[in-house]
Image: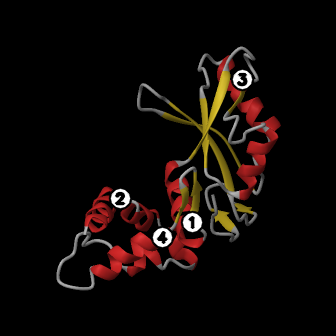
């Protein structure tokens, strides 16, 4: 996660902390119960395969089984996935504490949704049925310039995302929403 890269003075400790541009945090979260526990953090350091396996092993040794890892799809994390053998065909790796079990790997849903939106707008998405592109989305937005709005929360802002606007999850959620799906289906019948 990116952080403000300035020097920081802690009055209580009378200490100056070096400036850092990002922090890596590894947390455990319950699946059946709602709890979260930070396990590791470090400044300006990538999570490597060895580090992740050490954290998983330590967590398992305290009695908490690790079933999955969730992270965003940054370049560094994609490198981590490759080092773990994660691909379209293989979405898990051997648990380093118990090789008879797998640890499943998932993309963080908000980041994944933004990437789907960005790829859909930029290049289209290849499927078994052909390429899906953003043309129907543009048609719905164009149609809404009149009085009738099937998706009143949507505008060209949702499609013409540039720079920091591409990081806004809300715009991606609105664009890839059920109301947009229904609007496209309705327009397809006309």
Q: Quadrant of the N terminus?
A: bottom right
Residue at the disc numbered 4: 134
Locate residue 33 relative to residue 86 in the image: left or right: left
Residue at the disc numbered 2: 177
Residue at the disc numbered 1: 124
Give me the C-alpha separation between circle 1 and circle 4. 7 Å
Give the colour scheme shown: secondary structure
Give how far across and how far down residue 161 sits, in percent.
Answer: 50, 77
Give me the C-alpha separation between circle 3 and circle 1. 36 Å
Give how far across and how far down residue 169 sits, in percent.
Answer: 46, 62
Element type at marker 4?
loop
Element type at marker 2?
loop
Foreground of the two, 11 or 77: 77
Give me the C-alpha separation between circle 2 and circle 1. 17 Å
Label number found at residue 95:
3
Label number found at residue 188:
none
Give how far across and how far down residue 81 sits, in percent.
Answer: 74, 43
Q: Residues within 10 Å of mark 2 (few under 14, many from 20)?
A: some
Give me the C-alpha separation between circle 3 and circle 2. 36 Å
């Amino acid at each position: 996660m990116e952080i403000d890269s300035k020097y920081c003075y802690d009055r209580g400790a009378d200490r100056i902390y070096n400036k850092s541009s990002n922090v890596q945090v590894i947390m455990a979260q319950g699946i059946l119960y709602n709890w979260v526990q930070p396990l590791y953090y470090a400044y300006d350091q990538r999570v490597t395969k060895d580090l992740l396996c050490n954290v998983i092993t330590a967590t398992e040794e305290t009695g908490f089984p690790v079933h999955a890892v969730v992270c965003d799809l940054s370049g560094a994390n994609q490198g981590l996935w490759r080092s773990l053998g994660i691909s379209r065909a293989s979405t898990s790796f051997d648990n380093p504490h118990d090789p008879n079990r797998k640890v499943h790997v998932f993309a963080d849903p908000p980041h994944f949704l933004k990437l789907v939106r960005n790829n859909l707008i930029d290049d289209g998405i290849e499927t078994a049925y052909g390429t899906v592109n953003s043309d129907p989305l543009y048609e719905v937005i164009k149609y809404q310039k009149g009085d009738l709005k099937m998706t009143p929360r949507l505008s060209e802002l949702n499609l013409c995302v540039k720079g920091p606007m591409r990081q806004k999850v809300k715009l991606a959620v609105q664009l890839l929403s059920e109301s947009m799906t229904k609007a496209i289906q309705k327009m397809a019948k006309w």
